[in-house]
Image (tube, helix red, strand yellow):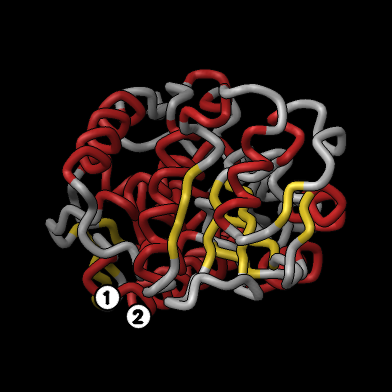
């Protein structure tokens, strides 16, 4: 059996998008993950021909070769955090758990499988925020990392998130009318680096976790730091952070960094530094993965 080839996001064969190679690399990984079996390039040629995603056999081989190069780059960047092994013309599962990577991979699949956009269990958005917060603890040792998008303070009333972040950042909460609703703040995670003297003038990151496959590029400009600086008197201007579960190609990553004007975390950066997951988070991701894997579209 084979995973269906969705094709959304690839573009036409004569004018493919910059996302095509990374999307097909994701498809290859999911095929291997779903059926727990090695996959050879020659088999992939047979799957691609006649799909409309490639012009001919030569184009199929070119796409497959580029996707394998991408997978090899992921393997080099992630090491033991990557659940696949590539040798010659074959990719196969390593048997390693790599829960964070598998979770981000499945979160990314609705980009090419449009039915999954409505079918997926929706709690993956909360799980991703929790995963990003945990990864930031490893990426930024010595920083305090807080979740705001899914936690209890998100439902604590108007201005509570902004006031709480101001307290974390040693700032002064000056205008509660800037964000009429809690969601307007657009902050899912916040990170601050305090010092032993307890004074202000500390670095602050305000972060958005973007999982929507159709609007993540628009969310690169969130949170609106200028608006935050109208609500809170920071002693040092915060930096924007945007995290996505996708494997971004170089062009998309460049576009994201220009738009974000801050720190961008994609799948490789998140999973490469995530470390061991807390038991509670690991259990949440495992349960979601089991439910989501059962929804994978299979070819007739």
The image quadrant of residue 276 is bottom left
Residue 75, placed above or below residue 172: below
Kindly identify which numbered label has been placed on residue 76.
2
Percent position of residue 237, x then y: 76, 69
* Residue behind mark 1: 79
* Quadrant location of the N terminus in the rendered image: top left
Please tell me whether mark 1 sits on a helix, a strand or a loop: helix
Residue 91 visible, this angle:
no
* Residue farthest left in this picture: 95
Residue 142 visible, this angle:
yes
Residue 229, placed above or below residue 126: below
* Quadrant location of the C terminus in the rendered image: top left
Residue in the foreground of this view, choosing between 268 and 138: 138
Q: Are marks 2 and 1 in contact (CB under 8 Å)?
A: yes
Q: Residues within 10 Å of mark 1 (few under 14, many from 20)?
A: few
Residue in the foreground of this view, choosing between 154 and 19: 154
Which residue is located at x 73 percent, y 72 percent?
Answer: 236
Q: Residues within 10 Å of mark 2 (few under 14, many from 20)?
A: few
The answer for how far apart the CA atoms under marks 2 and 1 are is 6 Å
Residue 268, placed above or below residue 174: below
């Amino acid at each position: 059996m084979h995973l269906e080839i969705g094709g959304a996001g690839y573009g036409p064969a004569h004018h493919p998008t910059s996302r095509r190679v990374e999307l097909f690399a994701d498809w290859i990984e999911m095929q291997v993950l779903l059926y727990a079996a090695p996959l050879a390039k020659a088999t992939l040629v047979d799957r691609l021909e006649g799909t409309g995603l490639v012009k001919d056999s030569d184009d199929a081989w070119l796409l497959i070769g580029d996707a394998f190069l991408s997978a090899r780059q992921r393997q080099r960047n992630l090491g033991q955090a990557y659940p696949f092994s590539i040798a010659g013309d074959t990719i196969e599962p390593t048997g390693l758990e790599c829960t964070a990577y598998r979770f981000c991979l499945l979160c990314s699949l609705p980009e090419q499988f449009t039915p999954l956009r409505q079918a997926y269990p929706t709690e993956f958005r909360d799980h991703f925020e929790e995963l990003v917060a945990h990864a930031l603890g490893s990426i930024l040792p010595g920083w305090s990392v807080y979740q705001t998008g899914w936690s209890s303070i998100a439902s604590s009333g108007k201005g509570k998130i902004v006031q709480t972040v101001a307290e974390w950042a040693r700032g002064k909460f000056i205008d509660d009318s800037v964000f009429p609703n809690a969601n307007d703040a657009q902050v899912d995670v916040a990170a601050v680096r305090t010092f032993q003297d307890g004074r202000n003038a500390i670095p602050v990151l305000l972060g958005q976790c973007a999982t929507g496959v159709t609007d993540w590029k628009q969310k690169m400009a969130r949170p609106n730091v200028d608006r935050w600086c109208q609500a809170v008197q920071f002693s040092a201007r915060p930096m924007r952070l945007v995290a996505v579960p996708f494997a971004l190609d170089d062009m998309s990553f460049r576009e994201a960094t220009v738009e974000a004007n801050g720190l961008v975390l994609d799948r490789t950066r998140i999973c490469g530094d995530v470390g061991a997951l807390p038991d509670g988070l690991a259990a949440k991701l495992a349960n979601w993965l089991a439910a989501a894997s059962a929804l994978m579209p299979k070819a007739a």
